[in-house]
Image: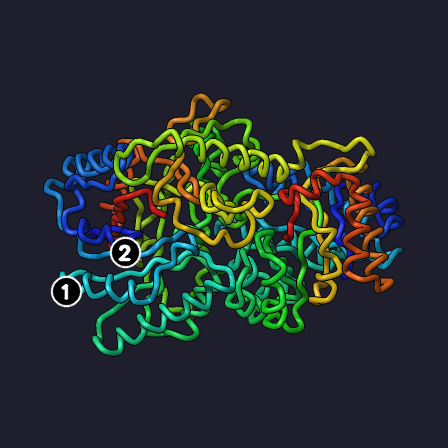
Amino acid sequence: MNILAPLGAKEEVEMLAESGAEEFYCGITPMEWMEKYSPGVWINRRNPYAGFPSFKDLKEAVRQAENYEIPIFLTLNAPYYMEKQYPMLIDLIKRCTEEVGIKAFIVSDPGLMVAMKNKVPEAAIHVSSLAAPMNTGSIELYKQMQVERIVLPRSVQLNEIPALKEAAGDVELEVFILNDGCVYEESFCMTTHSAGAFCSQSQWDYEPFHSDGNKVLSEKDFKILNDQVNDYREFVWFVNDCNCQIANDGLPLGPCGLCSLGKLEKMGVDSLKVVGREGAPYRKLASVQMVKAVIDQVRAQASEREIEKTARKIRNQPQYCESGLMCYYR
Amino acid sequence: MKFAVAVQSIRDLKFVKEPWAPIDSQNDIEAELQTTFFRIWQDTFGEVISPDRIIFGSEFCQYRLPAARVVKKALDYCWENGMDFSFATSYVHEEKFKQLADILSLLDEAIQESEKRIEVIVNDWGVYYYTKQNFPRLDIIIGRLLNKSIRDPRVAHYYNESNAPEEGKDFFKKTGLFSEPFRQFLNDGKVSGFEFDQLIQGNSLSEEEAKQTIGLHFPFGCVASGSACMVGFIDSDKADKFRGDPECKQQCQFYVFELKNKRHLDMKNRVFQKGNTAFYSHDSGLVKTGLESLQTIENARAVYSLRLPV
């Protein structure tokens, strides 16, 4: 079970590798893409400025990572691409495979997966969680498309993973372990973060009404719904990294699956994704260190109870752990 | 042009034959949009026509997946009334994937017995693959959740501004489903059509691209859908809310929310959340644009939902 860390600049390679990262992922948006489509059309799920600034920098990051025998994967997981974007995408994949040394591409669009198999068959595909591989049917589909890895969406819970693992066979499974949740299913959220996350609660008031005819909600209904909205707001707050806060001890807050690492190991999960390419270097460092501390226990074959205890101790936020709302897996 | 009515509950089936008539179970929003939709239909096409197809089932929530006997009942009603039948499916986690397989099997048997055609509208690539592999007699329609255009009512009206780059504007209006690699991906499946939302920024659908059935949904477009249902967890302990199985009691059929934005004050479309899915409602301009665009497509289908479609 490898720790997959986000990378935003070549300067981050050494500190993250030395702290326990075993795989990296990152993004890049070629300048010609931005010139042609504007920075509003994202080549992957994050804004262009969350990625590497140049191929030169990316190549240098790959070279440094190779010194640690760490592969770098590149995100090309925009929700969709139109026909005329394919030539530029294929050129990018060829260049990154042949010249830069990228080891795999994280892709969500089945059309791009087909194009890659046709034009750059040596390029490995990791199916992004944006492709919503949440049942054995989708696992079978992507397996048949000869992908190397499938990233399970955040909504997949522990009890679902064994069946998906069995269906995946030799195809690797990756799961989310730390930071940045999604209130909606990532694959089915048709919004853009360029306007801020749609789910960010502070921008919305929720006004309930009856969905069945023009019945009037009773006072009791309003009370129940008001309580529910308050719980929902709290959940959204956790999902959005506790309003992007850092705890008093300097550790980043936000969605977390550290308690479940023992179970994930037993289920045969291959990779643990730390989210946050666009985050500050310190946030990435602290996140990798947290996962590494718990993984060390897993590798030392500690019991599930000990692992859970260690995870909670490291998080040092008992009230948040108790709430359950910060947990990726329950 | 074909006309389909989408219903998500068996009790609404009885309204399908005259979808323009007032319906007790509609709320004010749904009634207002019904009036708008059929007024613009009449302005555009003249007399309203009776629907030729029922689309039954929820595209958005696996916990709205009906029992197989309910699907059979809907199918029987549909065929008894001389209409074609489509079964709409949502994205599904593994447990519901198995339940869905039973329904697909039932529909496949119905085709064998009747020699009629049945469509399955898929909103999950796993469901697409499973249907293609196991039930080749079923016609597959690629649902609007697999048609990945940006549908963000906070900013969509800016995507068509005159000073926006042409290539950028084009991107936001197009679908990725008609690219050559995507056609290859779909070419061994029995795909007979594609579903679209009428986008606030406008859709770009050339006749060349639209050789198969193009279904355009009215009067609600999907913004976002997910597992964190706003009301399904009402009875759960707080620590168990918004992830995993809500042991759903269908609370979305009683409660819905209007989402009012405090930052994007220039938003032009209202936003509602029913259960696990947020929708933007169509204004008269969107309905008009959508219906007019269907006139230019050879195999066009207007899909009208009586209710907020969960």
Q: Which of marks 1 and 2 is nearer the N terminus?
A: 2
Q: Position of residue A261 (x, y in %)?
A: 74, 57
Classify mark 1: residues with Cα within 10 Å, few (<14), some (14-19) or many (20+).
Answer: few
Q: Where is residue A233 in the image (x, y as percent from the top left)?
A: 55, 34
Nearer to the camera, B282 or A124: B282
Q: Distance between the residues labelled 1 and 2?
A: 15 Å
Quick check: B177 above or below B167?
A: below
Residue designated by label 1: B80
Q: Is mark 1 on a helix, strand or loop?
A: helix
Which residue is outermost to the front? A220
Instruction: Name the residue located 31 percent from the left edge and 47 percent from the top edge.
Output: B216
Classify mark 2: residues with Cα within 10 Å, few (<14), some (14-19) or many (20+).
Answer: many
Nearer to the camera, B34 or B294: B34
Q: Position of residue A53 (x, y in %)?
A: 73, 39
Which residue is outermost to the left? B47
Instruction: Name the residue located 41 percent from the left edge and 29 percent from the top edge.
Output: A207
Task: Give the residue type that dot 2 points to.
Answer: Ile
Q: Which chain carries label 1?
A: B
Q: Is mark 2 on a helix, strand or loop?
A: strand
| A102 sits to left or right of A38 | right
Snapshot quadrant of residue A254: top right
Residue designated by label 2: B55
| Residue A47 seen by the camera | no
Quick check: A44 above or below A139?
A: above
| B120 sits to left or right of A128 | left
> In the rendered picture of this protein, how many numbered marks are placed on residues?
2
